[in-house]
Image (tube, grey):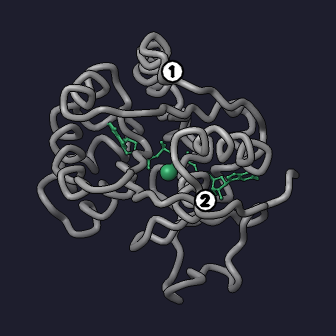
Amino acid sequence: MGAPGSGKGTISERIIKDFPMKHLSSGDLLRTNMKNKTDVGETAKRFIDNGHLVPDEIMTKLITNELSNFKNGSWLLDGFPRTVVQAKDLLKHTEIDIAIDLNVPFEVIIERIQGRLVHIGSGRVYHTEFNPPKQHGIDDVTGEPLIQRADDKPETVLARLKAYQNQTEPVLDYFREKKLLQVFTGRYSNELWPKVHKHLSTRIEPLQYTDYGTG
Ligand code: G5P
Ligand code: MG
């Protein structure tokens, strides 16, 4: 859990490097569908481009379908659930052990999102200063071009933050009541990372600990 730009993708990449887990990002899945012009992608685009959430029934179907491929082993959901309806549907479908919330101030987020570059094929995220690619505008792994997300325009970011406050913050209370929620507060992913690693290690044996410093 975490607002747009709070670092869910960044921390997720670190988690799957250090823990034996699979990563499923609802946003990456939607962007792949948009790129491939599937029916889901075409419908989702209308909502995403305006900074609105995609309707619950589409999202729940999409994610629970994908989760059925992850029957064995541990997995990490990034960006789902985003409404209380989605959270209830998820728990009807499966159990979860931990909900992590990255609580980063909105003013930090707005500044960060302006510098984001993404590789659509893999979902890898970069930042012009915080995490620059080795070669400007090029993905380190595939050599393919990086893009700025269409929904990272300032006015769309504001709509996304509003959707987060109205529709997603109540999910935090839902998980808190179920005693699943752990909140990590800070301004930098490097500051949150060791705490997230430690907390996850209480439930799943890490493969290693990668140190990114603290600044
Ligand atoms: P997404 O794709 O899930 P958002 O809006 O939730 O999109 P987003 O924007 O992907 O979240 P993030 O993953 O939380 O952000 O953050 P990130 O990409 O790791 O970090 C943001 C930037 O900051 C990057 O450039 C990163 O390098 C940099 N950064 C990270 N840490 C630091 C730091 O410490 N310092 C600095 N300087 N920079 C840093 O969803 C997109 C849309 O899909 C739909 C919605 O329309 C949504 O708006 N959608 C759903 N709709 C309904 N239900 C769902 N469940 C949905 N899921 C997606
Ligand atoms: Mg993301």
Crowd around label 2: few <14 · some 14–19 · many ≥20 (10 Å): some
Q: Looking at mark 2, is its residue's CB closer than 8 Å to ligand 1? A: no
Query: What amino acid type is highlighted by mark number 2?
Result: Arg
Give the crowd class for mark 1: few <14, some 14-19, many >=20 residues within 10 Å: few
- In the image, what residue occupies the spot 22% across and 31% down? 56
Please state the horizontal and vertical placement of residue 156, each as a whole percent of the image.
Answer: 49, 41
The residue depicted at 42 percent of the width and 15 percent of the height is 178
Please identify, in this view, whether the residue under mark 2 or under mark 1 is nearer the observer. Answer: 2
Displayed quadrant of residue 107: top right
Considering every residue shown, the one lying at the far bottom of the view is 143
For the residue labelled by badge 2, is the local secondary structure a helix, a strand or a loop? Answer: helix
Query: Is 152 located above or below residue 82 in the figure?
Result: below
Could you tell whether 33 is left or right of 26 in the image?
Answer: left
Find out if the beta carbon at label 1 lies less than 8 Å from the nearest ligand 1 atom.
no
Q: Which residue lies under the disc numbered 1?
A: 165
Is 201 rendered above or below residue 207?
A: above
Q: 214 or 47: nearer the eye?
A: 214
Q: Does residue 117 lie above or below 43 as drawn? A: below
How far across and down, in percent of the image, does residue 19 sit?
54, 58
Q: Quadrant of residue 134?
A: bottom right
Residue wearing tag 2: 14
What secondary structure is found at the residue carrying circle 1?
A: helix
x and y, in percent, of residue 2 in the image:
55, 35
Give the Cα distance between marks 2 and 1. 26 Å
Quarter location, residue 47: top left
88 relative position to 102: left or right = left
Label 1 amino acid? Gln
Q: x, y percentage for residue 9?
A: 54, 53
Nearer the observer, 202 or 123: 202
* Residue appearing at x 22%, y 69% in the figure: 36
Mark 2 in CB contact with mark 1 (< 8 angstroms): no
In the rendered structure, which disc, 2 or 1, sits on the residue that comes first in sequence?
2
